[in-house]
Image: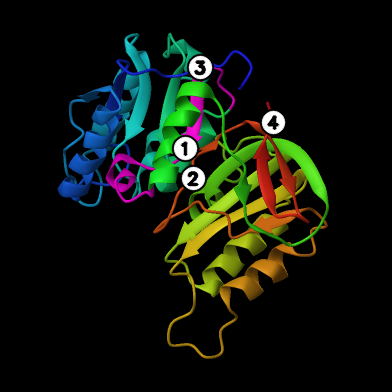
Amino acid sequence: MMINFQGLKPGDKLRVIAPSGALREWERFEAGVKIWRSHGYNLEFTSGFDQVNGYLAGSDENRRQQLIEALTDETCRGILCARGGFGSTRLLEGWKWKNIAQISPVPKFLIGFSDITGLLWAFSNSPQIIGIHGPVVTTLASEPDWSIQRLFDGIETGFFEELQGEGWGGGSVLGRLFPANLTVATHLLGTAYQPDLTDSIIALEDVNEEPYRLDRMLTHWRMVGAFKGVRGIALGRFSRCEAEGNSNSFTLEEVLRDRLGDLGIPIVSNLPFGHEGSNAILPVGRVVHLDGKQGILSFSE
């Protein structure tokens, strides 16, 4: 249980917003809504969430307004992101409120992953926002039962079962957890919305990025000193990230081991979070324990 944790409970109102890509997977969306409602939650669709503007869910102004309406709603206990895609960082450009507490009068959850990394990281130091890296509405119904149960256990009780992966060594360490999509996080480096990663454990996943592109991003992290102060790295699923039609390419694992293996910190891979498979929820900013020998990511009381 997190200190001063105010969990959600059936009957709470949650607002659905689309801060990134346009919503097109309506059957999957409705299946996700059904799961939330079956657990007793009152979902309200924020005006404009169904708009389409190219690959975006409406204009920047529309998507930013959705977010602001959800944040300022005193009767809302949580914000559910409809889907990922691209667009969250466009909302941060020109953001006028330095402190999220200025517009969020009550603490509330923010749930999503992939492109939603932009919002999870931007609001990670606000006591008003409890960030949860986990399924968006359109992916929830594809989660296995244990992962769905983990979601509701986590948001209602603050308890998270440990996750088992493959340890690469490096001992064990405690640190604040910052889950992220690697591509989105890379493009936050050096901006006002990059959290302080000192004494952190970063948890990374991605999709549709060939090994050379992952190499390029991780090399950028190294060159700008972004790994300085990071205590450990938890690697989730990198879906469809193997090279296609290029026999000369490094494999995904070769790139990850080459770019991360010499950092001298605990690393655990193959953890069950990310795209196209089980996406176990991860609490943003929570102090966690990473065991690079046993391959375990566990969550402190």
Q: Amino acid at mark 3?
A: Gln
Q: Amino acid at mark 4?
A: Ser
Q: Nearer the viewer, mark 1 or mark 2?
A: 1
Q: Secondary structure at mark 4?
A: loop
Q: Residue at x 53, y 46 (%)?
A: 180
Which residue is the site of mark 4? Answer: 300
Separation of residues labelled 4 and 1 (CA atoms): 16 Å
**Is residue 198 visible to us here?**
no
Which residue is the site of mark 1? Answer: 150
Answer left or right for 283 relative to 297. left
Q: Nearer the viewer, mark 2 or mark 3?
A: 2
The answer to whether residue 134 is magenta is yes
Which callout, 1 or 2, points at the residue further toward the start of the chain? 1
Which residue is the site of mark 3? Answer: 128
In the picture, the disc for residue 280 is 2
Q: Residue at x 37, y 22 (%)?
A: 78
Q: Are marks 1 and 2 in contact (CB under 8 Å)?
A: yes
Q: Secondary structure at mark 1?
A: helix
Q: Secondary structure at mark 2?
A: loop
Separation of residues labelled 2 and 3 (CA atoms): 23 Å
The image position of residue 75, as x and y in percent, is: 32, 10
Q: Residue at x 46, y 19 (%)?
A: 97
Stretch of the chain drawn in magenta: 125-144
Q: Are marks 3 and 4 in contact (CB under 8 Å)?
A: no
Separation of residues labelled 4 and 2 (CA atoms): 17 Å
Which callout, 3 or 1, points at the residue further toward the start of the chain? 3
Say which quarter of the image contains residue 35. top left
